[in-house]
Image: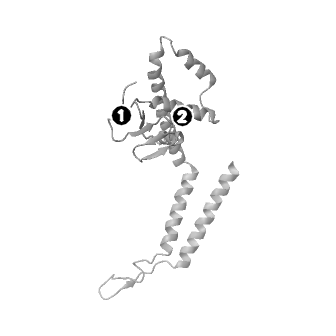
Amino acid sequence: MAKSGTSDSDDVIIIKKYANRRLYNTRSSSYITLDFLAKLTREGKDFQVVDAKSGDDITHNILTQIIMEEESSGQQMLPVGFLRELISMYGNSMQSMIPQYLEASMDAFRKNQEKFHSAMEGSIKNSPFAQLARQNLAMFEAASSAFTPRKDKGASTPSEPGTSVVTTAPSSDDEIAQLKAQLSAMQRKIDDLVDKK
């Protein structure tokens, strides 16, 4: 294994593994666990684990250990058939091609997952629930304006020389009545949606 005591990027967190199996985060100057490294991985943060004594890069070993911990804790994701096939590839003439193939497969899976999420978000935006969300926002804004003094209340707007017209804003009673009507309409729509299920 190549010696890797330093990192090419400031974004990479260096973790030192000591002989007593303890892991030390050099960035936060604290001891950490495998669970913490699993959390960093899920958050997309890059880290490198090096042997504290030899300086060897042992990131691969630690990531494999994390997978074993996850698989043994009931979060099994790797099917037995896949594991058998993977084991059978060791020593095979195709072994050198497997890492690139697996990386490309995972990259394609991740891209498809992002497209799926985007499609789901798009369908939700056009759904009745999105319409309800927009109505809720409109009601919230209407409710906020009911308690906010209007600038034009009681203001006079000249229409002709020597005369003035006083503009009056809708009363609070009118606004409350409008809010009640909107609430009733929204409740009817929710009831309709429930009945259709």
Label 2's element? helix
Q: Is residue 1 above or below residue 50?
A: above
User: Which element type, helix, strand or loop, lies under badge 1?
Assistant: loop
The N terminus is located in which quarter?
top left
- Give the mark toward the camera: 1 or 2: 1
- Give the class, few, some or many, for how many residues have Cα within 10 Å of label 1's Cα (few <14, many ≥20): some
Looking at this rendering, what residue extends furthest in the left direction?
A: 161
User: Are discs 1 and 2 less than 8 Å apart at CB?
Assistant: no
Q: Position of residue 21 (x, y in %)?
A: 51, 36
Residue behind mark 2: 66
In the rendering, at what x and y percent does residue 192 appear?
66, 54
The residue sitting at 60% across, 19% down in the picture is 84
Q: Is residue 77 left or right of residue 49?
A: right
Identify the mark nearer the N-term, 1 or 2: 1
- Name above or below for residue 84 compared with residue 62: above
x and y, in percent, of residue 194 in the image: 68, 53
Residue drawn at point x = 43 percent, y = 38 percent: 16
Observer-nearest of 84 and 55: 55
Q: Quadrant of residue 27?
A: top left
Q: Nearer the viewer, residue 102 or 28?
A: 28
Residue annotated with mark 1:
5
Three-letter residue code for mark 2: Ile
